[in-house]
Amino acid sequence: MGVFSRFKDIVNANINALLDKAEDPEKMLRLMMQEMEDTLIELKSSCAARMASKIRIERQIQEKEALASRWQSRAQMAVERGRDDLAREALVEKRKESEMLAALSSEVKNYDELISQSRSEIDQLETKLAQAKSKLRLLQQKAQAARQAGQAESHLNADSDSRFESLQEKIDRMYAANDLNRKKPSADEIFRSMEEKAEIEKELEELKKEVSR
């Protein structure tokens, strides 16, 4: 079963409210758009049929106008030749055609109203569909931004981990070197070791602060 049941449901629908309730907003939006597009096809088909009917009736009106004019000419001819009986018959036929013309003109007027209504509904639905498409693009952009943010964070964490491991390895090597040189360390070596330790410890603390942010 679709999201909507008729044209008015689509036009009156609050897209944002429906999406707020949906577990998968993008999927829900695609379903809405599919129904809008299907309904739009039906509306355009109906409008085209009404326009074709109007054209057919307008063609009949032209034919009836020609016949009415012809019967009018015949009535005049009959009067000119003193055939009042034939003139009466011609005028009767002209009246029939005129009555049919009035009925056909009324039909054309009705079709004008129906076509105008169809075009209005098509415009409303196209506006609603455009809103839905814009909403879908916005959802897709947000999803892409979230994915990119996640990838950036992953790269940052990986880079921080790599730097942390590199520093840890430096510290391990430094302690190992100290163990090897513990027997006869010179004063210069002792001070250099202390300075190196201080620098590395400082860099390590800064990295820890960066990672914990």
Image (cartoon, grey):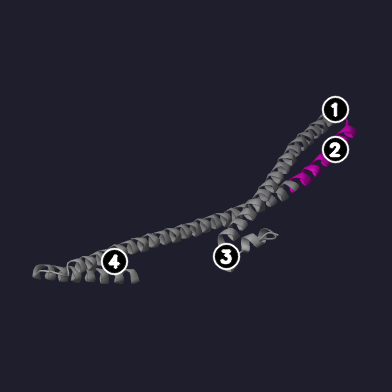
User: In whole angstroms, how far apart are the C-alphas of marks 2 and 3?
Assistant: 65 Å
| In front: label 4 or label 3 | 4
User: Please, is residue 67 above or below residue 39 in the view?
Assistant: above
| In front: label 2 or label 3 | 3
User: In percent of the image, x 76 and y 38: which residue is there?
Assistant: 60
Give the amino acid type for the residue marked by disc 4 in the picture: Gln
What element does badge 2 sit on?
helix
Left or right: 139 in relation to 169: right
User: In whole angstroms, how far apart are the C-alphas of marks 3 and 1?
Assistant: 82 Å
User: In whole angstroms, how far apart are the C-alphas of marks 1 and 4?
Assistant: 126 Å
| In front: label 4 or label 2 | 4
- Picture quadrant where residue 54 is located: top right
Residue picked out by circle 2: 93
What element does badge 3 sit on?
helix
Q: Position of residue 160 (x, y in %)?
A: 33, 64
Residue picked out by circle 1: 81
Give the amino acid type for the residue marked by disc 1 in the picture: Arg
Residue picked out by circle 3: 19
Residue picked out by circle 4: 168
User: In whole angstroms, how far apart are the C-alphas of marks 1 and 2?
Assistant: 19 Å
Q: Which residues are magenta?
A: 83-106
Check contact, mark 4 vs mark 3: CB within 8 A: no
Q: Do we see residue 81 in this rendering? A: yes
User: In percent of the image, x 63 and y 54: which residue is there?
Assistant: 36
